[in-house]
């Protein structure tokens, strides 16, 4: 069996099947997966083979069952679980998994020896990727190695009929890791969970060591505590993640069946849910219609929620922009200014993993940040890439993630962050070495973005391997094609790729594109009419600059002066006229920023990426409009000037104006894409780029593309977190550098 079949209870599962069918033989882990030798009646062997995939354990993913004849061995009288074969990296490590119902019941059972034990786990749940340090996946190669098993744990570990058989993180209060609560570097006497819960209920901020790093927690119902956390973390507006029981989530949110299913998955991601029911402080997600919720995913989190009895903020333990702290000493040093107390434990974290962030749209699930619980899961390469070889793709500058291809699979790495930040760059370099060692990866080529200024591009170019430079939006297009299994020879698709910024082949900054192409190449058949990025990088942070240049281009300079009377408009206009630090850009993201500012929905200076676009989406959500603002489309160029003029002359509420913006933009882009399909030049339309995380825009595009095949992102981020997958596929397809 090949796939995600080690560390998930697969060998005892096979052992049970074989005993059920009366077969003799053995099962073992080897360097390529799980190997089974079985002998017995042919019908029983057929049933065994069928059951291997059909009845696999909950955390397993069986990609292939390869069967062949075995003559058996003399003297076999039963079926055994044999020792692991030689080390290797052809099989996969399972992602970390949320506490299973059996372990949850155990920590709440006063009669159980793991009652209230924060590190309870079994083969169906618990830490995996965050503790592994080498392959094969055995306890000695995890951060559990310093904790020798007691006699009771050893008996469970050795019993094939026990759900903890060969559960490498197995632990109990006698032999496993311990948690404690401390203030000012000094441990306090008492149970860690009880002390932390008391601090949280008193309005304090507590740093909690989780699976992939520290969180900062506070009482989500306490507006003062939330405000204090924001002030200390220097995070004025970016939404804060919440955790709570199912009852708590239901009390404050509108949760559909698909959303419940996503929340309850072993990955336990943060899921964006519409606000409903009892009101929580607005400061949790200012101006947003949704809150990000996750169910508790470790026994420690469950115990905290049980005692506190109310939802908690559970946000990354870091200064905004920096990576999450993972070590105890690191947390004491970096989080002392944020936290009043710390929940520490002595199990080391092998690699930093943020929480995954996802949502459900009318078109299905959507991954916004791929991290804990999702990695290191792999994706099958599309048909035609079976002999792709080993490629390393370096990703982009923002939402950095790498991708490795090997054995017909693509391993898309976890979210790392923005590479401008020195500590994130260190984490990126560590991830390159970590993945290469863990998966025995030896790339034959490296794929990078066109932008020479990206640190990931520079690092790839310095490796001395054959280099493939991939245009940013072509990589986005290939990413969504690859996720959907579009065959290498499947014909061309037309991609609507909308994002913030990416270097175009003409040297300008792209971001609102319609591309006709495949993995091997593309042509640009439509784009948003460019406007200057006034102030260069400043335009990415200050939304008013984008409103100014678009209003000026629409002949609405006087309106700009009324809206921005306090701004240095004359100086900015002079710089734009002189072409000083004002590169042209077709960025859809910057158009969103400018219109959100004009509607009064976004501040002049944003405190996090995507703030203005999220505000525009939130304002439009749930508002049905019959027509959008007009956009002029000529020769493939989409000009928003008529939209600005129509809005200036109208008298509509900001929410309606925002909804009309989404509708008009969707109609313009979808019109160009439909024409390519109608003319037979494309077989489908593909939607990608960070702006495609906007569910209102996605829904509008799908309405305008009704009847046309559409490829969407579901498990791979539409933003730059999925860029590396597309880069790897373009490189593997032998594309010529643009």
Image: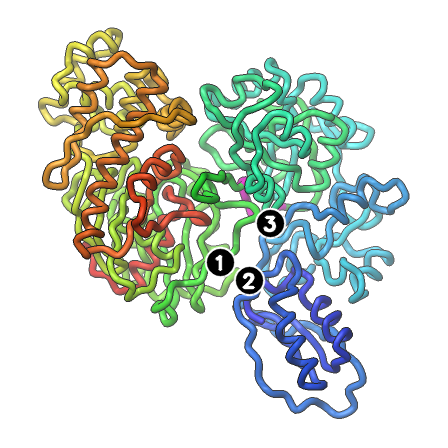
Using the image, tell me which numbered label, if any, was put on residue 130. Answer: 3
> In the rendered image, which residue does mark 2 sit on?
92
**Residue occupying the point 20% across, 24% down:** 643
Tell which circle, 1 or 3, labels the residue nearer the N-terminal end: 3
Q: Quadrant of the C terminus?
A: bottom left
Query: Which numbered disc, 3 or 2, marks the residue closer to the eye?
Result: 2
**Residue occupying the point 28% across, 26% down:** 661
Q: What SS does tag 3 mark?
A: loop
> In the rendered image, which residue does mark 1 sit on?
378
Looking at the image, do the residues carrying marks 2 and 1 touch, with CB atoms under 8 Å apart? Answer: yes
Q: Is residue 20 left or right of residue 322?
A: right
Q: What SS does tag 2 mark?
A: loop
In this figure, what is the number of numbered marks? 3
Residue 13: % across, % down: 71, 66
Q: Is residue 35 above or below residue 213?
A: below
Q: Is residue 662 left or right of residue 427?
A: left
Q: State which region is magenta.
A: 349-355
Residue 503: % across, % down: 23, 42
Q: Quadrant of the N terminus?
A: bottom right
Q: What SS does tag 1 mark?
A: strand
**Crowdedness of circle 2 by 10 Å Cα count: few (<14), some, many (20+)?**
many
Tell which circle, 2 or 1, labels the residue nearer the N-terminal end: 2
Please say whether residue 607 is visible from this viewpoint.
Answer: no
């Amino acid at each position: 069996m090949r796939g995600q079949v080690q560390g998930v209870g697969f060998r005892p599962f096979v052992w049970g099947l074989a005993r059920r069918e009366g077969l003799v033989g053995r099962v073992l882990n080897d360097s390529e997966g799980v190997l089974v030798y079985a002998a017995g009646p042919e019908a029983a062997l057929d049933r065994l083979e069928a059951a291997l995939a059909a009845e696999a354990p909950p955390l397993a993913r069986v990609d292939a069952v390869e069967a062949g004849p075995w003559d058996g061995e003399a003297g076999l009288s039963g079926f055994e679980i044999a020792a692991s074969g030689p080390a290797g990296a052809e099989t996969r490590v399972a992602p970390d998994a949320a506490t299973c119902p059996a372990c949850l019941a155990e920590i709440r059972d006063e009669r159980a020896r793991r009652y209230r034990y924060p590190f309870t786990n079994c083969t169906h749940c618990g830490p995996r990727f965050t503790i592994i340090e080498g392959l094969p996946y055995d306890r000695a190669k995890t951060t559990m190695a310093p904790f020798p098993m007691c006699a009771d744990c050893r008996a469970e570990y050795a019993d094939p009929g026990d759900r903890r058989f060969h559960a490498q993180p197995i632990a109990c209060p006698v032999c496993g890791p311990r948690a404690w609560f401390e203030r000012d570097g000094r441990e306090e006497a008492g149970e860690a969970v009880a002390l932390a819960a008391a601090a949280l209920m008193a309005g304090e901020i507590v740093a909690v060591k989780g699976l992939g790093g520290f969180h900062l927690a506070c009482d989500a119902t306490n507006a003062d505590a939330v405000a204090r956390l924001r002030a200390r973390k220097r995070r004025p507006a970016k939404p804060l993640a919440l955790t709570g029981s199912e009852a708590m989530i239901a009390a404050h949110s509108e949760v559909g069946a698909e959303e419940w299913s996503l929340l309850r998955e072993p990955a336990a991601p943060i899921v964006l849910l519409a606000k409903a029911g009892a009101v929580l402080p607005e400061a949790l997600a200012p101006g947003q219609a949704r809150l990000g919720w996750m169910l508790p995913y470790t026994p420690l989190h469950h115990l905290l929620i049980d005692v506190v009895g109310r939802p908690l903020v559970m946000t990354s333990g870091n200064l905004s922009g920096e990576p999450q702290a993972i070590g105890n000493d690191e947390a004491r040093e970096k989080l002392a200014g944020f936290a009043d107390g710390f929940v520490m434990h002595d199990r080391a974290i092998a690699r930093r993993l943020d929480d995954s962030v996802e949502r459900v749209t009318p078109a299905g699930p959507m991954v916004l940040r791929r991290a804990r619980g999702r990695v290191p899961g792999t994706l099958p390469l599309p048909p035609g890439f079976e002999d792709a070889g080993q490629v390393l793709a370096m990703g982009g500058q923002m939402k950095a993630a790498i991708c490795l291809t090997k054995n017909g699979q693509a391993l898309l790495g976890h979210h790392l962050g923005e590479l401008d930040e020195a500590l994130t760059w260190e984490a990126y370099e560590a991830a390159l070495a970590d993945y290469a060692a863990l998966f025995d990866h030896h790339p034959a080529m490296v794929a990078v973005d066109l932008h020479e200024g990206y640190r990931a591009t520079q690092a790839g170019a310095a490796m001395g391997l054959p280099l493939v430079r991939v245009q940013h939006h072509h990589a986005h297009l290939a990413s969504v094609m690859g996720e959907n299994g579009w065959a290498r020879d499947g014909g061309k698709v037309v991609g609507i790729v909308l994002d913030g910024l990416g270097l175009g082949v003409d040297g300008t900054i792209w971001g609102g594109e319609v591309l006709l192409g495949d993995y091997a190449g593309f042509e640009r058949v439509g784009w948003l009419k460019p406007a200057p990025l006034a102030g260069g990088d400043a335009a990415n942070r200050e939304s008013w600059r984008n409103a100014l240049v678009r209003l000026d281009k629409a002949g609405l300079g006087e309106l700009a002066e009324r809206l921005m009377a306090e701004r240095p408009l004359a100086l900015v206009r002079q710089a734009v006229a002189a072409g000083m630090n004002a590169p042209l850009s077709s960025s859809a993201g910057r158009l969103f920023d400018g219109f959100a500012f004009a509607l009064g929905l976004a501040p002049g200076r944003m405190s996090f990426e995507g703030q203005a676009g999220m505000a525009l989406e939130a304002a439009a959500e749930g508002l049905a409009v019959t027509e959008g603002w007009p956009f002029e489309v000529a020769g493939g160029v989409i000009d928003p000037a008529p939209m600005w003029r129509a809005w200036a002359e109208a008298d509509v509420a900001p929410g309606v104006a925002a909804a009309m913006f989404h509708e008009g933009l969707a109609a313009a882009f979808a019109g160009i894409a439909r024409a390519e399909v109608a003319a037979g030049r494309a077989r489908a339309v593909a939607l990608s780029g960070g702006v495609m995380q906007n569910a209102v825009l996605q829904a509008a595009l799908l309405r305008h593309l009704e009847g046309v095949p559409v490829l969407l992102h579901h498990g791979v981020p539409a933003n730059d977190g999925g860029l590396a997958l597309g880069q790897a596929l373009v490189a593997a397809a032998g594309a010529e550098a643009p």
